[in-house]
Amino acid sequence: MSTVQEILDAAQALPVADRARLLSALWGAVSPEDWAPPADDWVAEADRRSAAYDAGDMTAAPWSEVRQRSRRKAGLDD
């Protein structure tokens, strides 16, 4: 049986598009009840961004646009 490190090494050797698909599949296989709570610095950053948005100091974009930009930057879409 493979160890987690062996599986990780094999996954890291995959092309980026395959790694992204693997990541998505693994993420979907973990129940939210099993997620680790976010670190304090992540919560602080989310609070900072929320306050900036509420104050009108930053804007938001629809998820569809954010996803499209992210996929393009990751080389998953042409």
Image (cartoon, rainbow, N blue to C red):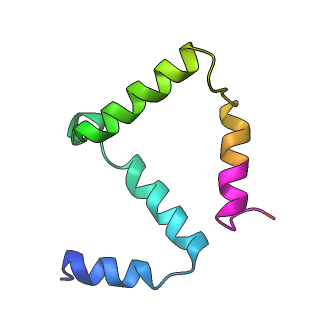
Could you tell me which residue is drawn at 63 percent across and 27 percent down? 58
> Is 11 positioned to the left or the right of 56 in the image?
left
Magenta stretch: residue 1 in it?
A: no
Residue 4: percent from left, percent from top: 22, 75
Could you tell me which residue is drawn at 23 percent across and 37 percent down? 40
> How many marks are shown on the rendered structure?
0
Q: Residue furthest right?
A: 78
Q: Is residue 74 visible?
A: yes
- Above or below: residue 53 compared with residue 69: above
> Is 46 positioned to the left or the right of 75 in the image?
left
> Is 21 positioned to the left or the right of 61 in the image?
left
Residue 34: percent from left, percent from top: 21, 41
- Above or below: residue 58 compared with residue 39: above
Q: Which residues are magenta?
A: 69-77
Q: Residue furthest top?
A: 54
> Is 30 positioned to the left or the right of 64 in the image?
left
Check the picture and name the quadrant holding the N terminus.
Answer: bottom left
Looking at the image, which is closer to me, 1 or 58?
A: 58
Q: Quadrant of residue 7?
A: bottom left
Could you tell me which residue is drawn at 63 percent across and 16 percent down? 56
Check the picture and name the quadrant holding the C terminus.
Answer: bottom right
Q: Is residue 38 visible?
A: no
Residue 19: percent from left, percent from top: 50, 70
